Amino acid sequence: MRFVLWLLANVLAVGAAAWLFTGITLASSGENRVATLIVVGLIFGVVTAVVKPVVKFVTFPFILLTLGLLLLVINAAMLGLTSAIAGGIGLDFHVSGFWTAVAGGVVISVVLAAFEATVGRRDRD
């Protein structure tokens, strides 16, 4: 059940970012769009679970030096990496531009935090 909630949170977060920003594009047709969104949510979740902690550990002194602003760049890089992996396996998901990735990363972080605040606590009890 926890995996399904985790996947749902990532799908909703990536979907919200794609809905808000024209620079984040998904497949154009209905069923294909949902399937692409699910796979991209899975890719994004794996990237943030595996790559992001390593990047944060390596850049920790710079995160402190920039008072945490580097975390915005790291979130954008994770979204860009997700876009590259999705494109590499033939999915129709693309993030165009650094600032779009930064804004998308912020939206994804906010949606995931809100999801964790509401659903995450009930799952632990």
Image (tube, helix red, strand yellow):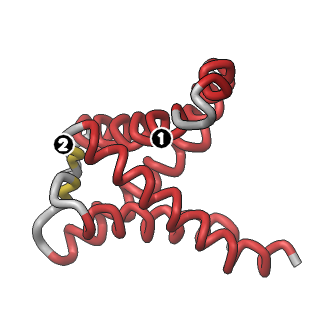
Q: Which residue is mark 2?
A: 96
Residue 81 drawn above or below residue 10: above
**What amino acid type should be assigned to the residue bearing mark 1?**
Leu
- The x and y percentages for residue 2 are 69, 68
Left or right for 76, reference 74: left
Quick one: quadrant of the N terminus?
A: bottom right
- The x and y percentages for residue 37 are 32, 63
Residue 116 drawn above or below residue 61: below
Quick one: quadrant of the C terminus?
A: bottom right
Left or right for 59, reference 77: right
- Most distant residue in the left direction: 28
Closer mark to the observer between disc 1 and disc 2 = 1
Q: What residue appears at the point 30 percent right and 67 percent down from the top-left corner?
A: 35
Q: What residue appears at the point 62 percent right and 28 percent down from the top-left corner?
A: 63
Left or right for 21, reference 47: left
- The x and y percentages for residue 121 are 78, 75
Where, by quadrant of the figure, is residue 4 drawn?
A: bottom right
- The x and y percentages for residue 79 are 38, 43
Residue 57 drawn above or below residue 78: above
Tag 2 or tag 1, which sits nearer the N-term? Answer: 1
**What amino acid type should be assigned to the residue bearing mark 2?**
Ser
Q: Secondary structure at mark 2?
A: loop
Where, by quadrant of the figure, is residue 68 drawn?
A: top right
Q: What residue appears at the point 69 percent right and 73 percent down from the top-left corner?
A: 117
Q: Which residue is mark 1?
A: 72
Q: What residue appears at the point 33 percent right and 62 percent down from the top-left corner?
A: 17
Q: Secondary structure at mark 1?
A: helix
Real-space Cα distance between discs 1 and 2? 16 Å
| Mark 2 neighbour density, 10 Å: few (under 14) some (14–19) many (20 or more) | some
Residue 122 drawn above or below residue 109: below
